[in-house]
Structures are given as structure tokens and as C-alpha cells.
Image (cartoon, helix red, strand yellow):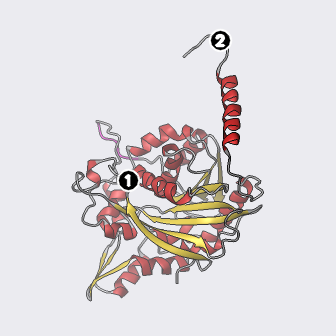
Amino acid sequence: MTSGTSFIKTTKTVEAVTPRSSTRCTLDPSRDVLKVVYDVYEPRDKGDDTTTSVVNYVFLHGSGMNRRIWCYYLDKLADPVRNWKIGKVILVDQVTHGDSAVVNERLLGSFYDWSDGARDICKICMDEFFQQNGRSVFNIVVGHSMGGFQALCCPILFPGLFQSVVCIEPVVWMKRVRKESDEDITIIPPTFYHAMHATMTDEFSSIQQYKKFMETQSLYSKAHPSILQEVEGFELRKISSELFRTKISTEQHMVAYLTLNPTATWLMKCLSSINCPVLCLYGEKSRWCPPENRIYLREHIPHYCEDEIIGGRHLVNLEDPDSVIAKLTSYIKELLPDDDGEASQALDENARKARFSEQYRELISNRVWQGTPKL
């Protein structure tokens, strides 16, 4: 049973951003256009649509997962305080994952640039979140692991689109094998490759075999029971009476792990450009990323704060979702500005002229000074 009984769900399919960052993202880049599948959840009780200020969320999954990991969170996202209400909650399958992977199956190549996923998110949210009607809007992007990386990309790629970023165990700076040529690409040792591959089975001869894998070997083996049940039902594809598959293929799952760099290098150089508040949540016992990853984010993101989930591991959003939700909602309530909930009045022509004159005088006052220009 899908969570979200307080919401009305609409599933949409749109074109992904084109062109992609690499010609290897699709098999025929001159013709192939990828699709993105996502769900939009809107409250059944919207209250007064014209006066309530709204908070919008978009949730981004990690490598090998899908949008349904976040369904558990929906009804637990309480309305914030002080006249703010939830507007939309968007759950997205990245182009190589979930339902998007099924739609794109014939097109997918051997490369997945993580920033392309962030560009897709910006495109979706630009269309979904900005239906202007005079209300105040506060947009929040939440991402785990790879999704945390993509969440950090969003305010760099599209300043002003999001008012805050929440990253759960973001993966940015990872150790990698260095060749003599020191190419800026992700390279992993064979032992790590085989260890990850063991969690990526995508073909099964029966539903029982599939369920056993999901519950004992997959990324979800220690997930909260409700999340495990949700994902088990969603990820399964019946090909025939004797063949079952997951929506994500083993190959595309592995591709996601092997394509962090060089985009990570770009992101690390751009972190200082993030102009909105960022919260990073870490599992206390997580060992997925080296300590340098957390230190680097702390030192290079301007409006940064962090918190820990006691006892949490890298998959803390799956394994201890209630603690993550508590941290998230507490942070958002503190962050939201005071707002009277009233829609702003539309400007008539005289008001527009007066506002421009005032803003232009302020611009000249701040930007025209006596002095010697310097580099």
C-alpha cells in the first residue's frame, strides 16, 4: 500500500534535458531523447489556495534505488508553521532507474553524468513549482547519496530555484584508483567491483527468488519494513512465467557507481557558489565516504550546517526514516521566514514604475563609487 493518503498523486512522463553531457549517455545521441518519470503529490485539503504560502519538496534517490523509497515520508511531512502549507511533493526516477529506466531501456548508453540528473530535476521543478499567483513559495530539494550530490548541483545550475538543500549522506569526494596518466575519472579496484556486483542481481526465475534477494542481499535488506514492502512491489517486472527482472539493470546500476568523476571535480570547485542554506545529515556509523568528504563540504559550502543520526549508516534514509524525517521537519520549521500567508497584490502600471525607479536608484547608489578600479 503506497503511503501518501493525505495526497492526490499524479504520475507524469517528460523529456529529459537534451543534449546530455556525454555522447555515451545514449546509444544514438543524434536521435535518442530520454524520458523522466515522476510523481506529483498534492494535498487533498489545499485550504485557501490563494492566500496560503507553500513549501514544495522534491526528493532524489541514490544509486540503484527508485522514487518509491520516499513514499514512507509523505504523510509524515507535517505542514510547517506560520501560515506555510505543503504545496507539492515530487518523487523522481532518474533516467537510468525505476520506471524511467524501463521507458529508456532501448536508448541508454554506458555513461550517466550525475549532473544531468540535476539538470532534469531543475527542468521539472521549474515547470511544477512556479505557477505564479502571488503566493510566497519555498522550494526544498532533498537527496540521498547520489541524490545528495545532485541536490547540491541544483542551486549551482539554477540559482534562485531552490531556497534550501537537504543532503543525506551526500557522495562527492571519494577515493579512487589513480592511473599514471591521472585521468579525472572514477576507477575502482576489482574487489570493490565484485562486492558491489553481488548486490545487483536483476534476473530471477521466480517471485520467491526475487523476494529472497531483495530481503537478504539487496540494498534494501535492512530497510524499514514499510519501505522494503513498497520497493519490492514497485521494482519487480514480470517478463514471463519463469522470468522476472528488476526495473534497473545490473549494468545501469554499475554505470551509476562508475561515473562520479569527472563531474565531482566540477562540483567541488563550484560549492562556494551555492547561495542558499544547506543541511547535510550523516549517519553516525556510516563509512561509505571518507571523512575528507564531510570536511570538504563543511569548509566550502557558505551557508552550511550538519547533523548526525545516532546509529545511522549510509542508508540511514531507508533504515531509520523516522529519525531523518524528524531532523528534516525541525530544520525546515526553523528555516522558514515569517509570512502572513496573504497573496501579494498585483502591481498596477503606476506601482510598477514607482518600484522600478526605487530599485534603480538603489542600484546606482550601490554600484557607482569614486575609486580606482582594480582586478
Quarter-of-image position of residue 192: bottom left
Q: Residues within 10 Å of mark 2 (few under 14, many from 20)?
A: few
Residue at image position (52%, 84%) is: 1
User: Crowdedness of circle 1 by 10 Å Cα count: few (<14), some, many (20+)?
Assistant: many
Relative to 371, say whether 130 is above or below.
below
Residue under pointer 2 = 371
The kind of secondary structure element at disc 2 is loop
Query: What's the residue at 54%, 17% (across, down)?
Result: 375
Spot occupied by residue 43 in the image (x, y as percentages of width and height): 62, 73
Q: Nearer the viewer, residue 103 or 192?
A: 103
**Secondary element at image label 1:** loop
Q: Is residue 145 visible?
A: no
Counting labels gives: 2
Q: Which residue is mark 1?
A: 17
Q: Position of residue 224 (x, y in %)?
A: 55, 76
Residue range highlighted in magenta: 176-180
- The kind of secondary structure the magenta stretch mainly shows is loop
Q: CA distance from mark 1 to mark 2?
A: 45 Å
Q: Is residue 82 left or right of residue 199?
A: right
Q: Earlier in the sequence, mark 1 or mark 2?
A: 1
Q: Give the side of residue 50 with respect to residue 71, left or right.
A: right
